[in-house]
């Protein structure tokens, strides 16, 4: 019976079994590809990868391609490369996945290298490979390579592919060869809308807004990208009015449109308008993205708008934003620069993903608030975390040493920067050492340090020595430094004002007259100081001698009241405090009505008794205003927090946190 069964057994059974096994294998393959697509972390992807190996599916090209793509999206380039290197034989699809992943992870050099490696193995690129190699060449500004790639694209016959064509034009725009970009554009069949937008961006980038507008007007069909590109161009060129008019004309707006306006205002120094635009966007029901909240937080930091910063932070918390590196850094920076260093520290602790920018922002925050020990502790914690310091971190920590008068420790860190970390000091590092020595009265040592510098001292170095000499009342050293300053920048108004004061104080009338003639002949202009205060969510800006504010009369009456009261406590107004920072400002107003005084008076009028007053000044506070702030804090029984271009001053009960030396 058994032999008969074997004789008459259906011959189709092996083929059916083979088909079933094939279907089962395809089903398993599809299942794993689906799992790869749903993986959210590298840990999950590794677990799926392990199961793929267990099922002996790794030699499968489709699965390998998906693994490389997924690991690239999860920002694990090393894992992508490891998967690629273990796969053989390599084909065009695996190469394409890797080249694309490397380009999108900003590993442009590696992307190009693997494209060359692809050719060396005799593997032909597919159509979708070229756009990512072109992107890499454009990002590295490799015009020669871009032109060579253009030749290859033509040779293999994919030059009329829409994606390839857009990337070709984009490459020429980014390497600033607009002529070649327009040639590709003119030779393009049909209407590719994205090409117009790329060229509008290109014209904007090189400042040819006339051509950008011409392209915009000639477009057969404008989309949101077209409007956004042109608005961005006007913002980039500083034409805020035309950007605003164009924004109003838009038939519809998306979050990119609003973010372009917020970012554009902020980049042009219009931080108050940037904040107004951001909150208007929210009122219109448009949900902000990461870029818009980071830009708005930066604008808040620039003008010290703590209330606005708090509103943005609340919005972030309520709308499920992840506290990623960019948002965490922006929040730490905002709180630190708005005077709430403890809030900055709390956000810093909550931010799980920290990069060197995060640590630097926190160290800077402690430094400018005068918390020397906390800055050092933060620096040590950064080192323990495995992040190596760079030149900017050393600038922050040297600032902390300078403000604390810790000269010897500062000099040791300066030497360590060069010897232990191989970081070559910049002019800013040298300036901080001169400032540190000058603050403690070591003027001769500071001068010797300047003379031994391996690079020629610049305006900032001599200006720092000059200011230190003035603070230490060493007129001889101050005059020596000022002469060096005049040699470097003879038209700087502040130096002439300072020298005039020195000559007047010494009774050197002929030198004084000579300096006045010099100022008149060169028509030297003064830098305007301005100060910001935030009251009831609105930011107010004051300039020196400002009479334009709607509450101007009341402000000046209040200021007179403050100065009278301060005078009774010993305040002596005067113009001897002309300048405190040679590189930043000069005498703002002969009457002594500097912007921070007006901001103070306005704040006392418009805020509740006992509330902390926060003032942000764009220049360095002068000694006269600094003195008045101390008396005002005692008279009003309020804390006054003033941030100038260098640091924070916390005035309370007639005392400043800087110890009267800044």
Image (cartoon, rainbow, N blue to C red):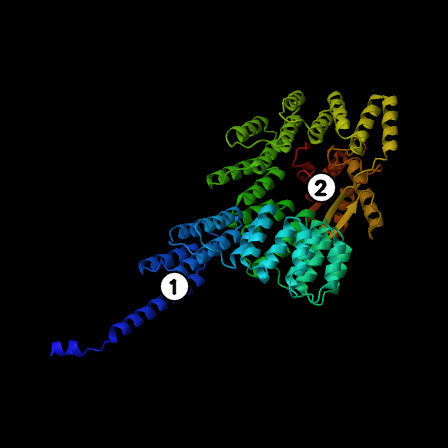
- Would residue 261 be visible to someone looking at this image? no
Residue at the farthest front position: 155
Provide residue 396's location: percent of width, then percent of height: 59, 37
Q: Secondary structure at mark 2?
A: helix
Q: Residue at x 83, y 35 (%)?
A: 524
- Give whichever of 136, 379 is nearer the camera: 136
- Give whichever of 319, 561 is nearer the camera: 319
Q: Earlier in the sequence, mark 1 or mark 2?
A: 1
Q: Quadrant of residue 617?
A: top right
Q: Residue at x 54, y 47 (%)?
A: 348
- Say which mark, if any, is on residue 596: none
Badge 1 vs badge 2, beta-carbon distance below 8 Å: no
- Would residue 589 be visible to someone looking at this image? yes
- Say which mark, if any, is on residue 32: 1
Provide residue 410's location: percent of width, then percent of height: 57, 29
Question: How many other residues sit within 10 Å of disc 1, few (<14), some (14-19) or many (≥20)?
Answer: many
- Give whichever of 152, 342 is nearer the camera: 152
Query: Compared with residue 591, is residue 279 higher up or lower down, i.e. above or below?
Result: below
- Left or right, 41 with respect to 153, comes to left
Q: Residue at x 33, y 67 (%)?
A: 25
Q: Quadrant of the C terminus?
A: top right
Q: Which residue is mark 2?
A: 633
Front: mark 1 or 2: 1
Q: Quadrant of the N terminus?
A: bottom left
Instruction: Give me the C-alpha separation between circle 1 and circle 2.
Output: 68 Å
Q: Secondary structure at mark 1?
A: helix
Provide residue 288's location: percent of width, then percent of height: 62, 60
Question: How many other residues sit within 10 Å of disc 2, few (<14), some (14-19) or many (≥20)?
Answer: many
């Amino acid at each position: 019976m058994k032999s008969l069964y074997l004789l008459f057994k259906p011959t189709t059974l092996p083929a059916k079994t083979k088909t079933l096994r094939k279907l089962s294998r395809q089903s398993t393959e599809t299942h794993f590809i689906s799992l790869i697509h749903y993986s959210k972390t590298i840990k999950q992807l590794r677990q799926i990868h392990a199961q793929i190996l267990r099922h002996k599916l790794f030699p499968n090209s489709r699965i390998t391609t998906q693994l490389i793509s997924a690991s690239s999206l999860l920002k694990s380039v090393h894992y992508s490369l490891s998967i690629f290197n273990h796969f053989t034989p390599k084909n065009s699809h695996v190469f394409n996945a890797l080249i694309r992943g490397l380009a999108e992870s900003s590993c442009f050099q590696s992307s190009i290298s693997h494209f060359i490696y692809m050719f060396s193995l005799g593997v032909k690129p597919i159509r979708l490979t070229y756009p990512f190699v072109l992107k890499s060449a454009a990002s590295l500004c490799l015009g020669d390579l871009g032109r060579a790639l253009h030749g290859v694209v033509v040779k293999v016959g994919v030059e009329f592919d829409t994606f390839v064509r857009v990337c070709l034009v984009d490459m020429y725009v980014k390497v600033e060869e607009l002529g070649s970009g327009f040639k590709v554009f003119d030779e393009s069949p049909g209407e590719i809308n994205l090409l117009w937008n790329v060229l509008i961006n290109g014209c904007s980038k090189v400042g040819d807004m006339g051509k950008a507008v011409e392209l915009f007007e000639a477009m057969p069909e404008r989309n949101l990208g077209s409007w956004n590109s042109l608005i961005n161009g006007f913002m980039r060129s500083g034409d805020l009015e035309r950007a605003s008019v164009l924004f109003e004309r838009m038939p519809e707006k998306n979050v990119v449109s609003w973010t372009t306006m917020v970012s554009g205002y902020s980049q042009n120094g219009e931080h108050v308008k940037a904040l107004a635009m951001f909150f208007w966007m929210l009122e219109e029901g448009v949900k902000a993205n990461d870029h818009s909240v980071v830009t708005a937080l930066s604008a808040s930091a620039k003008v010290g708008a703590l209330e606005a910063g708090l509103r943005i932070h609340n919005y972030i918390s309520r709308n499920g934003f992840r506290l990623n590196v960019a948002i965490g850094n922006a929040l730490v920076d905002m709180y630190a620069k708005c005077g709430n260093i403890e809030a900055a520290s709390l956000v810093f602790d909550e931010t799980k993903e920290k990069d060197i920018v995060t640590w630097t922002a926190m160290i800077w925050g402690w430094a400018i608030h005068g918390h020397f020990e906390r800055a050092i502790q933060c620096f040590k914690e950064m080192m323990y975390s495995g992040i190596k310091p760079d030149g900017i971190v050393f600038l922050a920590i040297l600032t902390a040493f300078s403000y604390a008068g810790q000269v010897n420790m500062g000099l040791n860190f300066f030497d360590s920067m060069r010897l232990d970390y191989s970081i070559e000091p910049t002019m800013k590092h040298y300036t901080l050492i001169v400032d540190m020595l000058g603050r403690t009265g070591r003027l001769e040592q500071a001068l010797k340090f300047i003379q031994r510098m391996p690079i020629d001292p610049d305006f900032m170095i001599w200006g720092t020595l000059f200011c230190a000499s003035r603070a230490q009342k060493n007129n001889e050293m101050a005059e020596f430094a000022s002469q060096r300053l005049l040699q470097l920048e003879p038209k700087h108004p502040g130096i002439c004002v300072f020298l005039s004061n020195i000559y007047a104080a010494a009774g050197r009338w002929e030198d004084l007259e000579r300096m006045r003639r010099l100022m008149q002949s060169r028509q030297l202009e003064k830098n305007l100081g301005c100060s910001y205060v935030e009251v009831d969510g609105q930011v107010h800006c004051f300039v020196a001698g400002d009479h334009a504010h709607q509450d101007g009369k009341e402000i000046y009456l209040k200021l007179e009241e403050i100065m009278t009261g301060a005078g009774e406590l010993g305040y002596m107004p005067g113009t001897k405090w002309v300048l405190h920072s040679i590189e930043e400002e000069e005498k703002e107003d002969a009457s002594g009505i500097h912007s921070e005084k007006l901001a103070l008076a306005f704040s006392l009028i418009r805020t509740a008794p006992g509330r902390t007053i926060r003032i942000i000044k764009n220049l360095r506070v002068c000694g006269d205003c600094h003195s008045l702030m101390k008396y005002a804090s005692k008279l009003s029984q309020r804390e006054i927090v003033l941030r100038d271009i260098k640091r924070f001053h916390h005035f309370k009960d007639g005392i400043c946190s800087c110890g009267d030396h800044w």
